[in-house]
Image (spheres, rainbow, N blue to C red):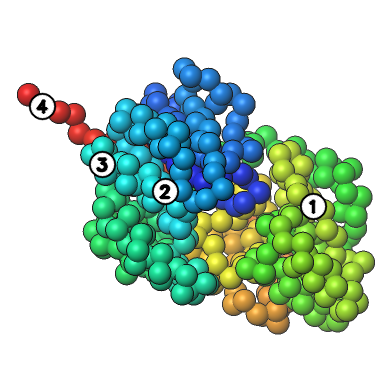
Amino acid sequence: MRILHTIDHLDFRRGGPSTAIVDLSHAMAELGHEVAVAALHGPDVPATWRGTACSPRAIDLPSTRTPLLSRNAREILRAEILTADVVHLHGVWEPLNAQVARLARRAAVPYVISLRGMLDDWSMAQRWFKKRVYWQCIARSMLAHAEAVHCTAALELRQSRKWFPEHLGRVLPNLINLRQFNAMPGAEHARARWPQLRTDAPKLLFLSRLSSKKGLDHLIDAAAQLHKQGTPVAVFVAGTGDDVYEQACRTRSETLGIAQHVHFLGHVGGVEKVSLFEACDLFVLPTSQENFGFVFFEALAAGLPVLTTDLVDTADEIAQSGGGFIVAQDATKIAALCHTLLGDRTELRRRGQLGRAWTFDRLDPARVGREFEAFYREHARKPAHG
């Protein structure tokens, strides 16, 4: 098959969709399919994707100062769509995808859409008026004409299916490249980079984009409560994002008297990220919404137990792993659960190993890759007969 993906930004710092596309594209190419990814901005396009004969192949679309594609970009996309068997759009609100959907319909080439959590109840409540207008004018038709609408968890489908014909919904987990977790680098790599990790205090890790949605402020409040209760935890914050929010969290930790126990590490990736998972005792992300959350399953793959909120679409899967714990987005309840879990760190490590085994079984990339291959075959352009 020839599979064309489209996304506005292929940028790992903007969240999980870029990672999902890169890993899925590699998996489909390894299964023998021709894969191309078109993006307006691609700072994280793998170097091996540059070339006319490679698969996956990157397509750099010329950008404009307006949401409308340039004539050159439309011609590039039209040519790519005509040779594709199926087009995979990532996201609902990007003008790029709406224009690609129209081009695909005119060429009679089927397309599927990954929602990426954008139709979850929490997401739809943000900037609701602007989204309702865009929905009525553009997005509703785009979804109605799709061959299928991809959700990454059953809870995402239950929340979002009121926005599109119910029969279009499909649930498939994101494909995760677990190779980096096969042979773990060990915690010492991270400890050498950040000596603060050598503390004997329990270490809580927050690793995500810094924004109010992700709930770092709830973790800081919970950590302050733990200190008052005699559990002096250390909090390690890995990530970048909203500078104003980051400063507010720094100020909050100072006001609560725990600034010396909250360490901001900046962006962390690659081997350092895996080692950081190993160096900590519990991963905590008190987020307001996640449709999948790659970082949850990366932590579990590294053997690090996960604590997150009941607002996550994959909360059931995280709990079922044996290494995950679900709580309300409330600092007092987060502190209470952390206190309980950290009271027996041997048991906590055992639960982390259960989560690791579950992740390698249930999210085995070969299995998920075959599921996506079947998904594409079901919805791809059918060969002409006669």
Q: On the picture, is 110 further left or further right than 132?
A: left
Identify the mark at residue 97; answer none if there is no mark: 2
Taking the spot 62% from the left edge, 26% from the top edge, the residue there is: 47
- Tell me whether the residue at label 2 lies in contact with that at label 3, contact meaning CB atoms closer than 8 angstroms: no
Q: CA distance from mark 3 to mark 4?
A: 21 Å
Packing grade of label 1 (10 A; few <14, some 14-19, many >=20) is some
User: Is 378 in front, or is 360?
Assistant: 378
Residue at the spot x=52%, y=72% of the render? Answer: 127
Name which residue type carries label 4.
His
Which residue in the protein does label 3 denote?
106
* Earlier residue among tags 1 and 2: 2
Q: Which label's residue is closer to the chain start, 3 or 1?
A: 3
On the picture, is 77 further left or further right than 169?
right
Per the image, label 4 sits on a secondary structure element best described as loop
Query: Mark 3 belongs to which amino acid?
Result: Arg
Mark 2 or mark 4: whose residue is earlier in sequence = 2
Query: For mark 4, what is the residue?
Result: 385
CA distance separating discs 2 and 4: 30 Å
The N terminus is located in which quarter?
A: top left
Q: From the viewer's perspective, is residue 48 above or below residue 14? A: above
The amino acid type of the residue labelled 1 equals Gly
Quadrant of the image occupied by residue 331? bottom right
Query: Is residue 252 visible in this depiction of the protein?
Result: yes
CB under 8 Å between callouts 1 and 2?
Answer: no
